[in-house]
Image: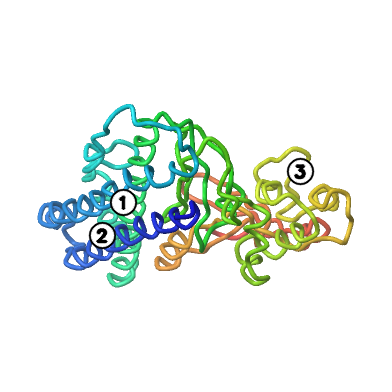
Amino acid sequence: MATPRRAELRSTELRTAGEASATAAVRLFGAADLDDPVASWRTLGPPLAATVEAGQRAAVGGARSYVEDVQVVTAPDATRAARVAVDGLVGTAADGRDLDALLYRPFATATRAVRLGASPLDARRLGATSLHRIVKTTVSDTGRAAERLELAAFRTSGYVRQVEYPARSRCIVLAGKWFRWNRGFERHPECDCVHVPAREDVAGDFTTDPRAAFDALDAAEQERVFTPAGAEAIRAGADPAQVVNARRGAAGLAPSFGRLTAEEVTSLRDGLQRGRLSTVTLYGHPAPETLALLGATGARVLRTDRDGDVAVAGNGAALRTLVRGSDPADAERRARHTAG
């Protein structure tokens, strides 16, 4: 079986296991009493942990056959040096914590939302969303950890990242990049990308090349993933990684009230000056869950991508916000103080 196709099947395997566990966990969470989360946790914690562990077992169960199948193509001379007990990964989170500490967080999130003024329905939705993301990500992380252990057992030197769609911009710019076997797998919550065990990039598929992965998207999806401004720059010849990193202090690029400056545009387009880009947000922030929680409590939300510079002044008894609009020429007119 071709390497990219086998990797796709592995990604589907992890996604299916994670989604099944997450759905079952959310169903259990529906019985939680947000007025007494501790008592609810005592009742629901054990079956929640068992649900996640079942997903983890499914995720690690396919790691050995996946690595063996792929290495027939990518590292045919590799031989197994040891047998790995991947079941030891079950029952813990990706960062080594017990599952209990991780799974209690949605209960605390929902309870806190109610205390801040959210309706019980909105608070429960927030908790359920958080739990779904935690469970699905934990199951996938466990499967990937098992894959890395299998790589070590074969003494395979590393892996190539294969992108699975829908993907975020940060995933796409890592497509085809080679990592040592013990390098952590960089992912966002609920990421479906997958390891391809290899000594080098041998997959030869669009899922392992950032520019080809970008070109495989239609125009609307390019703009959704990279923002309209970022997609425009890439089409004009910019390096996708440079575009995505532009707001992370990339060399030669500096923030300018949330916009790309003329100098940034020139740099991103390798000197091809084709006009000023529009306001962009390249981080993927703010998080929808955070906005939902704030909205549910009636809080006023200020965003630097829309409002420009935001400062909070005052003391503990009285706070005020100062907002400077994203257009420097219009800053004085838009500057305003508000009671907070």
Instruction: Please tell me whether mark 1 sits on a helix, a strand or a loop.
Output: helix
* Disc 3 crowd, CA 10 A, few/some/many (<14, 14-19, 20+): some
* Image x and y of residue 3, in percent: 48, 51
Instruction: Please tell me whether mark 2 sits on a helix, a strand or a loop.
Output: helix
Whether the residues at callouts 3 and 2 have beta carbons within 8 Å, the answer is no
Distance Cα–Cα, label 1 vs label 3? 38 Å
The earlier-in-sequence mark between 1 and 3 is 1
* Disc 2 crowd, CA 10 A, few/some/many (<14, 14-19, 20+): many
Picture layout, residue 79 above or below residue 23: above
Whether the residues at callouts 1 and 3 have beta carbons within 8 Å, the answer is no
Residue visible at 25% across and 59% down?
21
The earlier-in-sequence mark between 3 and 2 is 2
The earlier-in-sequence mark between 2 and 1 is 2
Q: Amino acid at mark 1?
A: Val
Which callout, 3 or 2, points to the residue nearer the camera? Answer: 2
Distance Cα–Cα, label 2 vs label 1? 8 Å
* Image x and y of residue 289, in percent: 43, 61
Disc 2 designates what residue?
A: 21
* Disc 1 crowd, CA 10 A, few/some/many (<14, 14-19, 20+): many
Disc 3 designates what residue?
A: 253
Query: Could you tell whether 125 is left or right of 213 in the image?
Result: left
Residue visible at 25% across and 50% down?
103
Q: Amino acid at mark 2?
A: Ser
Disc 1 designates what residue?
A: 139
Instruction: Please tell me whether mark 3 sits on a helix, a strand or a loop.
Output: loop
Picture layout, residue 224 above or below residue 309: below
Q: Amino acid at mark 3?
A: Leu
Distance Cα–Cα, label 3 vs label 2? 43 Å
Whether the residues at callouts 2 and 1 have beta carbons within 8 Å, the answer is yes
**Which one is in front, 237 or 40?**
237
